């Protein structure tokens, strides 16, 4: 199934304490709350799949995928109070974050 929306925001988190269940729960709860930002069309919260091939990067702890209709909506998300609160309350949980943004080929 093709995603019809035009802007994908995919974030990978490396946690300070990746095996700490309380930290995992805190980040999961924060990401679930983050999904309430109204401009998000769809989202996915994930952990590395149990796959093993040379091209697979699976050292991250959590991934967050958000789908938006446009870059303008993603920019609304970036400054939305729920997003800012997520950063404020959860940033102590990770030591690295990488973001991949992509747009649909027209």
Image (tube, rainbow, N blue to C red):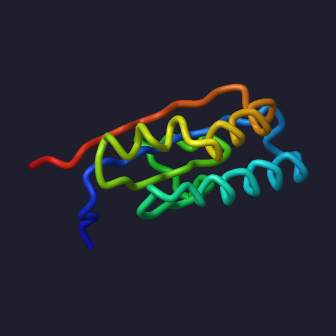
Q: Is residue 72 left or right of residue 76?
A: left
Residue drawn at (27%, 59%), measured in percent from left and top? 5
Residue drawn at (36%, 48%), measured in percent from left and top? 8
Residue at the bottom extreme of this rendering: 1
- The quarter of the image holding the N terminus is bottom left
**Looking at the image, how many numbered discs can be counted on the residues?**
0
Q: Is residue 93 above or below residue 104?
A: above
18 or 36: which is nearer to us? Answer: 36
Residue 50 in the image: x percent, y percent? Answer: 59, 59
Residue drawn at (48%, 34%), measured in percent from left and top? 99
Residue drawn at (76%, 57%), measured in percent from left and top? 29
Q: Is residue 94 above or below residue 62?
A: above
Residue at the top extreme of this rendering: 95
Q: Is residue 91 left or right of residue 84?
A: right
40 or 104: which is nearer to us? Answer: 40
Residue 53 in the image: x percent, y percent? Answer: 45, 48
Residue 55 in the image: x percent, y percent? Answer: 40, 41
Q: Is residue 95 left or right of residue 79?
A: right
53 or 80: which is nearer to us? Answer: 80
Q: Is residue 64 above or below residue 14?
A: below
62 or 78: which is nearer to us? Answer: 78
The part of the image, by quadrant, that contains residue 45 is bottom right
């Amino acid at each position: 199934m093709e995603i019809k929306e035009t802007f994908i925001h995919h974030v990978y988190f490396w946690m300070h304490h990746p095996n700490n269940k309380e930290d995992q729960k805190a980040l999961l709860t924060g990401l679930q709350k983050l999904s309430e930002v109204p401009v998000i069309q769809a989202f996915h919260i994930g952990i590395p799949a149990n796959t093993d091939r040379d091209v697979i990067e699976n050292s991250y702890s959590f991934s967050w995928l958000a789908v938006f209709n446009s870059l303008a909506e993603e920019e609304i998300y970036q400054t939305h109070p729920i997003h800012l609160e997520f950063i404020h309350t959860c940033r102590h949980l990770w030591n690295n974050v990488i973001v991949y943004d992509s747009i649909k080929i027209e």
